[in-house]
Amino acid sequence: MPPSLAHAGPAPAPEASVTPALSLKGITCTFVSRDDRSQRYTAVRDVTLDIAPGEFVSVVGPTGCGKSTLLNVAAGLLEPSAGSVTVFGAPLAGINRRAGYMFQTEALMPWRTARDNVLAGLQFRGVAEAEASRQVDDWLQRVGLVGFGDRYPHQLSGGMRKRTALAQTLVLDPDIILMDEPFSALDIQTRQLMENEVLELWAAKKKAVLFITHDLDEAIAMSDRVVVLSAGPASHPIGEFAIDLARPRDVAEVRVTPRFIDLHKAIWDVLREEVLKGYAQQKRAA
Amino acid sequence: MWKAIRPNSRNLRIWQVGVLVALFAFWHVATAPGLIPPIFFDSENDAKFFFGEPLKILARVWTWFVVDRDIYQHLWVTLLETVLAFLIGTVSGLVIGMWLALSPVAAAILDPYIKALNSMPRVILAPIFAVWFGLGIASKVALGFTLVFFIVFFNVYQGVKEVSPTVLANARMLGASQRQLLRHVYLPSAMSWVFSSLHTSVGLAFVGAVVGEYLGSSRGVGYLILQAEGTFDINTVMAGILVLTAFALVLDWAVGRVEKRLMKWQPRAGETEKL
């Protein structure tokens, strides 16, 4: 900042001066049934959420509360019915080019080997072959898949497929990482290993992360901030908690610290009612 | 005794050949004049007239392949017709299937016509093709094409429609353009469906070729059968059928090989290669 401006009026709060990496403003998503136009479902209503560069934010909420909808909006895969998305200050149109997305379900191309899957994004972007090859090798090593590059997804275990997906997303060096319950299909041990790996990679690169999960433990262990979403329909944030646990963290060890337990209790108090509400709604619908 | 020859995975081939030998032996005993008294027919020569004699049939095949060596040109023509019908049918099925699957408006307009063309008994087109394209290979290729095209078309259409939305969204997030999506997501997905229908479509290309020849031609195995039928030469007809069957088996085997090579990314039942 030029010195002359330093005296012009009161300095803004340091947080407000940083342009958020990702900013959702008043996002509402209403789905209309294709067969019957009068059948509508509002998944999320009036959601506003800012994520600073390098910040790790988790969104938790009961099942079916529109968490994935929110992520698809941030990715540019879904256009919101109302509201706006800005990425580093620029309004988002079409696919969010600065974001990488890790999906909940299998997203690898089954007809490509692990290596070719990691290569895909670089290939689509027209990166020179030698350079792309070097980066892919580097990432296969980082996620511990050296020697498995020539395997097809069906020949890999669930954990290896997730690691391939992680490398596939991160090799493009996105400024924003969107994750949709990426480890929910993994067993608890593999899951904690993956969570630690993600935290390590994140700590090294300090990307903005929007992490969606229904697992409160996971959310607290990994994030800087946890946002609680209400039960659907028309979900909206009902609570926001800063997680002041020291980093670096080990997701397994941090769970037994007193501070973790306090935070867990505080957030769970807000979340519990919503979970029960969501459960009751699903039972009624069934 | 039974324990030693009981069917198992090792002597499977021997049993398969055994069944074939037994069939031919039964055929021989039932048709050779004078070997057993006629049960069903009035005269002992009737069975041979209707069903042929396996020894003479095999002799006929031997003459074709080894003595006169005159079957190769016919087999070649039939093979050429089959392969051409298969290739042209597959490529056009692939292109049009992708096009219609990706442009819903065109698909909606053409839907009734596709259905009508598909449900039409297409063998009936053979005489028309003979008029249009003459009695050479073109009319047979055209008939085979009409059979292959729809198989491939419907499979490609389905394949493109059933691309996993997550894989598609992932490719888009990785920065794929429309063209790249077509090349790297839709095409491989559609190809897997094409390959799963490969055995059917090669079989139908073959049917198209032989039926076309049978209905009017001057060369090909179907033509040989037609000629023999004209002189009530049942042995030659049967020999032609045997050759066609063996030929179809070879084609099917070749397709299996190609499929295995190109589809190695697909999980197979019984495969336990996990880590």
Image (spheres, helix red, strand yellow):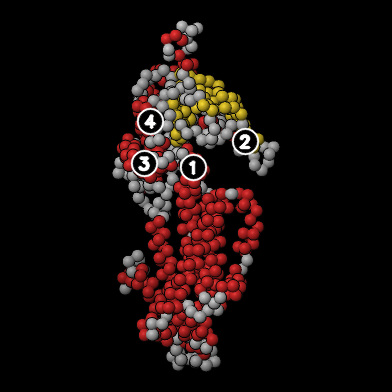
The kind of residue on which mark 2 rests is: Phe
Specify the quadrant that holds the C terminus of chain B. top left
The kind of residue on which mark 1 rests is Ser
State yes or no: discs 1 and 4 in contact (Cβ < 8 Å): no
Position of residue B170 in the picture relative to residue B132 (left or right): left
Cα separation between marks 3 and 1: 17 Å
Q: Which mark is residue A174?
A: none
Image coords of residue B93 (percent x, y)? 53, 59
Three-letter amino acid code of the residue under disc 4: Val
Q: Considering only order in the chain, which callout, 2 or 4, is on the residue closer to the N terminus?
A: 2
Q: Which residue is mark 1?
A: B177
Q: Chain of mark 2?
A: A
Q: Secondary structure at mark 4?
A: helix
Q: Which residue was labeled with disc 4? A: A198
Report crowding for label 2: few under 14, some 14 to 19, many 20 or more residues within 10 A (C-alpha). Answer: some
Q: Nearer the viewer, residue B245 or A265?
A: B245
> SS at mark 1?
loop
Q: Chain of mark 4?
A: A
**Label 3 neighbourhood size at 10 Å, few (<14), some (14-19), many (20+)?**
few
Mark 1 vs mark 2, CA separation in Å: 26 Å
Residue under pointer 3: A128
> Is B216 on the left or on the right of A183, as rendered?
right
